[in-house]
Amino acid sequence: MEIKYYIGLAVALFCIGIIGVLTRRNAIIIFMCIEVMLNAVNLLLVAFSKMHAAAAIGASSPSVVSDAQIFVFFIMVVAAAEVAVGLAIIVMMYRNVHSVDVNFLNRLKN
Amino acid sequence: MQTLGLRFPELLIWSPLIAGLLCFIIRSEKNAKAVALFSSIITLAISFASLMYAGDKQLSGLKDSYQWLHQLGASFNIGLDGMGQLLTLLTAFSFPLIFVATYNTNYKNANAFYGLMLLAQAGLMGVFTAMDALVFYFFWELALIPVYFLCSRWGGEKRIQATFKFFVYTFAGSLLMLIGIIYVYLQTAGNGEVAHSFALNAFYNVPLTYPQQFWLFWLFFIAFAIKMPIFPFHTWQPDTYEQSPAAVTMVLSGIMVKMGVFAVLRWLIPLFPDAVAKYDTLIIGLSVFGMIYASLIAIKQDDLKRLVAYSSIAHIGLMCAAIFSSTSIGVQGVVMQMFSHGINIIGLWIVVDLIEKQTGVRKISQLGGIAHKAPVLTIMLVVIALANIALPLTNAFVGEFMMFSGLFKFNVWYAAIAGISIILAAVYTLNMVQKVFYGETNAITATVKEIALNEKIILSVIVVAIFLVGVFPQPLFNLTKDAVTVILGKGK
Amino acid sequence: MSITQIVFWFLAVLAIGSALMVITRKNPVHSVLYLVVTFFAISGHYILLNAQFLAIVNIIVYAGAIMVLFLFVVMMMNLNLNAEPQKNKLMQFAGVVSGGSLFLVLMAALVKSTTVNSAVQMQTGDYGLIKNLGQVLFRDYVLPFEISSILFLSAMVGAVVMSKKEQ
Amino acid sequence: MNNVLQLVWLIPFLPLIGFLINGLGRKHLSKTLAGVIGSGVILISFILSVWVFFNVKNGNTHVAHYFDFINVASLKIGFDFQIDQLSSLFLLIITGVGFLIHVYSTSYMHDEEPKNFAKYFAYLNLFVFSMLLLVMGANYVIMFIGWEGVGLCSYLLIGFWFKNNNYNTAAKKAFVMNRIGDLGFLLAVFWLISKLGTVDFHNVFDMVGNNKVKGFTTFDITAITMLLFVGAMGKSAQIPLYTWLPDAMAGPTPVSALIHAATMVTAGIYMIARSNLLYTMAPTTQCVVAIVGLSTAILAATIALKQNDIKKVLAYSTVSQLGYMFLGLGVGAYTGAVFHVMTHAFFKALLFLGAGSVIHAMSGEQDMRNMGGLKKYMGTTHLTFLIGCLAIAGMPPFSGFFSKDEILAHAFEKNPLLWGIGVLGALMTAFYMFRLYAMTFLGKFRGTHDQEHHLHESPKAITFPLVVLAILALAGGWVGIPEVFMHGGHILETFLEPIFADSNKLITAHPLPHTTEYLLMAVSVIGALIALVFAWNKFSKYQKTDVAETGLGKVLQNKWYVDELYDAVIVKPLQSLSAFFNNIVEKKGIDGFVNGVGKAVNYGSRQVRLLQSGHVGTYVLLMVIGILILFIVQLFL
Amino acid sequence: MNATILTAAWGIVLMLAGAFIKNKSIPKYIAIGGLLLIIAANARELYTVNEGEILFAIDVKDMLHTTAFNLTFITVMLVCTLLFFLLSGRDIEKVGNHVAEYFALIFFVLCGVCIVATFNTLLMLFIGIEIISIPLYILTGSDKRNLKSNEAALKYFLMGAFSTGIMLMGIAFIYGGTESASFFLDKINMGAGKMPVMIAVGLVLLLISMSFKASAAPFHFWTPDVYDGAPTVFTSFMATIVKAAVFFAFLRLFEKAFGSVQPQWQKLIVLITAATLLIGNLTAVFQQSVKRMLAYSSIAQAGFMLFALFALNEKAKEGLVLYTAAYSLATIGIFAVLIKMNDYTIDGFNGLAKKQPVLAFAATVFLLSLTGIPLTAGFQGKFYMLLAAVTNGHNLWLVILAVLCAAISAYYYFRVIQAMYFKESNDAAVQEWDVTPAFKILLLITAALIIVLGVKPDLIIDWLYL
């Protein structure tokens, strides 16, 4: 499989995520879009790792492949932590204003 | 290890600095006043003492004294050459005058006031003694800060805006100069351990290409032009003078303005000879136009302070023009005139202040007939005013005479046009004298009383100085001759 | 057209399609579900790339734990369909345009890029297996591992601070 | 070298001392003391001057160097005095006449309160000091110092009664107009410095005369002389800068006599006579000088015809006489000019003092229309005044005749037309002087009654100077008897010979045949005589009429409207220009720009802050746009 | 290394303390004590850096690389934090009930600071940035009742997460682009010569995400709102130590990984710097609330700090350390004063010089330092930055722009000074001042530090090359 397809796929997902962030007002949905972006990254990293595996470097020092995959693992870890905090924040906001609309609170401007 | 005698440059900075900080510490306002006066006299003494070592190579500090920012090849390098000595003398001489003259004015929290005054003095001393570009820049800014506080704390009605304009204006200018300094610094050849050096002589020996000079010149010149100020950078000045308390105005116009002129002589001319040669016509043109312009505006002024301010702009314009004529006689005249103008304008301010204190107004149109009430004041003022219009045998004549002839050497027409300003000067000065002092007294001036003893003493000191320098200028020339040759020697 | 390719294209289309659904659905619950689908598709890709460990983790952590958390929150708030007032059309349009042009720009730059090796090793290669990764993780990556434990601690503290009732 | 020329510094120094004593001690000095000190110092310096004069007469001239005034970088200006025939002669005039006028003042100013009295003498001494500086200076700079010094003193003395603002304005006018001239003088000095590098008289004349300096062309000489002449215009009240002198009559009368008749106003003549060589070498300038001088003479004379203020008439006559002197200088009759300066000093001082005595008697009245018939009240004054009039009218054997005639004769050599106009002016002089005389002393008294009953002859202190001056006015001219009358009769010429030697070398003298010379004298004298008699008859029976002057008369009475002209052409435009600068350029233009920058920043800030909309969506959108831009810049540019 | 581990450990300690100790004022002392300990440990490591003996000999596979340079930086940051604790500790207690947790979170952030100061691989950078960000999201929202705080937290979190995504994308492309297929900085760095497109893309994405964290325009939008909304104490912390650390990481990343190809991406920095300077300064001019003004000023200062990346030479590195130190000290100080005010608007400062001369004086020093007046550390920072930029030699117009912006900055900083000294206080209501003598002394010490650094910046710079 050509790497460029993976790149295309990842970038597409990434941009979809961005578009989502841009077009939605529901904090939770925006957050989910960000998760999409992260997954695009993960996919790309794994694809690259396999690309390198097929390359000379992969043959010489196999660890490069696992490096990337471990990185993906850490990304997932961090993402999980972020979700915990993020949802906590959203919930707190919801408690105060009974809305998850990011434009609902707009005291801070200019 | 230097002998004590050759630590004069440092002493000149330390004594006001320490005294200034002391003023902040001591609570009593009376004592603050005393401390200020005392220290300023000490400083004067030091400055006189330093004259004995005039021309001493070690004194003129062209060698590293203290390591400072060694990674940058900057060093706390200060010294006194002829010009520096003249201006430090002016500074040291002015402050006691100012303190005594305004001794009866009571400022609220005076200790802060006098503290800041002394800090300003320290800064000025630093500027005049700096032999290292970075040190120079440091003091250049430091002199500004206390003055800013003085103006906006103890100033007049619209003080905050006026002085703030002044501050930002000059601050922007000096930052541009900082860039220039850095750029030149990077062109200098340093000694062993550091690549470059900020030392004055390193700067003097820096090889700059023509194009470099041409834009660097402006970075420096704008900063100095704002400080001097030269048309069209002058608009901060009248407002600031109008708003500042008298004592500060004296410092501003008497000494601070000289910083600009001094800096042009010390840093601009020797560094960028080609640029100077290229732009001299333009700048002299500006200055000369500024002279006429300021004089004409001065004729229209009804506020004493503004009038003096504009007349000062005109005088500075002449200095700038004479500098850029880069003839030795003209520059010598400028050095002379820096001193004379400092003294005269301080005298003028003292008189203006006295009048304002007694009558409460500065409007020329509201005054009149003071001569009946205060003849001594009048005589003093007339003498100072005559010095201001450069009557022979007053100090200003010598300077202006030489500046004009320098300018004349440069270009006949510039000299001729600039000459018109001496006529205009006569017009507005005599107008002022007539309207304020002659004629019948009116309701406002009826209550004017003769001035107090301390003021008499101060004014007579000034008058004596005026005539002394006016009749025997030669000693001052001998003092500054070498410095001028150095400047122009680099300039050639 | 080998089977791999077919699978790849299928998964790709599935991922993108469901991702699009995520951002277009009015109802948050639907979005969440479509997101789960996307994750599954991506896990499929992992398997295709022979990175089983990640595939599993992805399903367990993401599609499992995290999405459940989301779902839970959404449900708790029971945001009904028109809970979310629409962003004004201009903003949406601008968003789409800019996102799309970002995509175009990136692709335009990347397609003509020559990478070290254009082919990707499919199916084979055992680096992605749990055993190898585990060893690397606890031998070479012990420090980041520990640090990320700190990360979790802070997240935990945070969650507590956030959600604990002030008395 | 004998000691007297070592002591010359005392001559100016003594007046300075007098000035200091009177000035500083003015609160404590009694009037008498002040007067004694004031006149005493002058007397001493007069005696010294006489002594010096006779030394010089024995050909004992020298330059005394005291200290370096300015000595830097190729410019060396010493504080030097030059004692030679010319300066010593002027020393005599200044100190001599000066002394008399001091004496006169002691009585004339007696009504002042003591401290003003002392102040007055202080000023007067200061004036003498500066005047002496002016004539003794051995280079143009020292001369300039004196030059401006006398200007200052005239300013102070015109505005002596400073309560009256018109007087102050007159004083200011005088100073400023002098300043205009001084600028010319200064520029000339600068020119010398830049071209020759020296301002010492002997160096300059030496360099120029034997043209030692390369590239010092006739143009330079012309320019320098012209500029110097501008200075002279200001100081000696020539067209176009003469209008200050009549106004200067605001000052006390002795001041007018000393400064504005006898000494200061002749400074211009002195300066040109001093630099005669340069002028001789610049024919163009000479021509200009002659024309300006002559036209001034005529113009002033015409104005004088119609003035009714006794001092104004004298003032204009002074202007006119100065015109004659410049005519003399212009036609190369340097001796004649100096000669006329001398005689003029005598008779004009006399006339002014006489007028002063009259005014004193009339208790301040200056309008001739209210005078008349004073002859019988004040004999001495009348007699001396008559002598003065005859002298100025150029009646032989009075001093004025010789000097004026010498100038006219040279004028004729140059060009008969000059002579013709000159004579015309002389006739007018005779006319208005005797108009003045007749209106004042003849006919019957036209003033109020208490004035009439106050009328009295002035005290000795006033009449004594009058008498002395009258004698001088009568006999002063005999030092310059023309060749035609007596061979070698022109003592003055022989005395001044060394000064003008170089010029005379250059001037090809072609003396007139004696017949012509007799003819010329005859014409001028007879003409003057006719005018005199006519005026005498006409005005001895003058009656006050309140019919306003018309036509030319009105124009003359209003001094050709010159003041109005200047006001319209120079003062007003300057005023409006400065108003324009102050209100438009300064406030709106430059300061407007400076503040504009500040405003712009504020405005910009107001706009930029709108980016901060507070909506996450907008923020992210802007970020993405930023990302796009960066990508495009990085990848495609 | 010492600091990294100890901060993390102390964070846990405090966390537990929070569980068992109910007294609100104890945690502060624990924190200060711990911090002193950590500073000592770090200082020791710095002294012995050449011997390379450290307390915890963990083989980290060189994922964290300590040199005198970054150890000095860490020391500076820890000292700033200490001052922060000393000055504002009491105010942290006022924020909410979970005092110990707040301190714990701050220590976790410090751990992140140490990591990003020493990271040697993109993985550690990522984790470091996250371990800084996540606690900050919480601290921002810690004032739970306050809607502003909520809003700030939400905005910060969403945009932070977004930028994290961008950063990861960048890392992915970098990884894909390098033959060495490694996350280690030195491996990524492949000599001069045209970068491959993938690297370029990755670089841009990293640049963007770092600019976001460093609040450089046009990615600064979160800064004003978050700084404004967050509890003031934490704003003070965020705006100083965190920002400084991010900048340090920024510089470290781009110098080590992309230094050789700097000419190819300098234009981006130029754009960002110019935009940051202009937007930051211009917007600050308008602000009426000092707190928000300081937020914008922090953006403006970031513009100056970006010169370090613009120049990317020795002077730039020294300058950045100096600048961050000066900036942090001054900002911590000014915020410490601000917290004491009832009224955050500029008018609230009117006549402070009369009521609280010491506060006013100290605040003046801080503001002068921020303006960059000589004799204050701020000047040295700016001076070094300008020096570096001019040395670099390209785009001198940017330097001119910078100084003009500095002149503008004088405008808004001096408005406060004017208010304190030259205006009369208008409010009749006398506020009771919670100002202890100790606080005043500490303020003065901070001011003194600033001036000392302003006179002898060598004190820091000499340590950088031990």
Image (tube, rainbow, N blue to C red):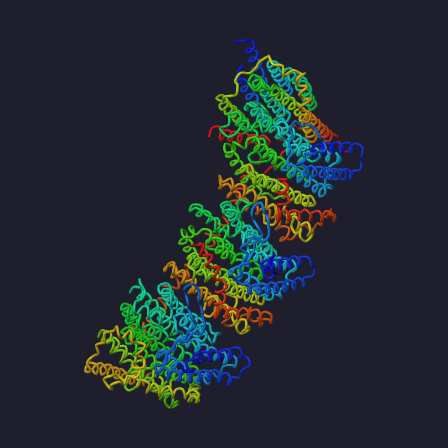
Label count reads 0
Residue E123 is drawn in which quadrant?
top right
Up-down: is D270 above or below B23? below
Q: Is residue D298 left or right of residue E148?
A: left
Residue D323 is drawn in which quadrant?
bottom left
Rendered-image quadrant of the N terminus of chain A: top right
Image x and y of residue E12, in percent: 75, 31
Q: Is residue D467 left or right of residue A10?
A: left
Residue positioned 53% across, 19% down in the render: A8
Image x and y of residue D443, in percent: 34, 87
Q: Nearer the viewer, residue E186 or D293?
A: E186
Residue C20 at least partly seen:
no
Up-down: is E286 above or below D61? above
Q: Nearer the viewer, residue A57 or C8?
A: A57
Rendered-image quadrant of the C terminus of chain A: top right
Up-down: is D404 above or below E60? below
Q: Is residue B20 left or right of residue B367?
A: right
Image x and y of residue E410, in percent: 57, 47
Residue B202 at least partly seen:
yes
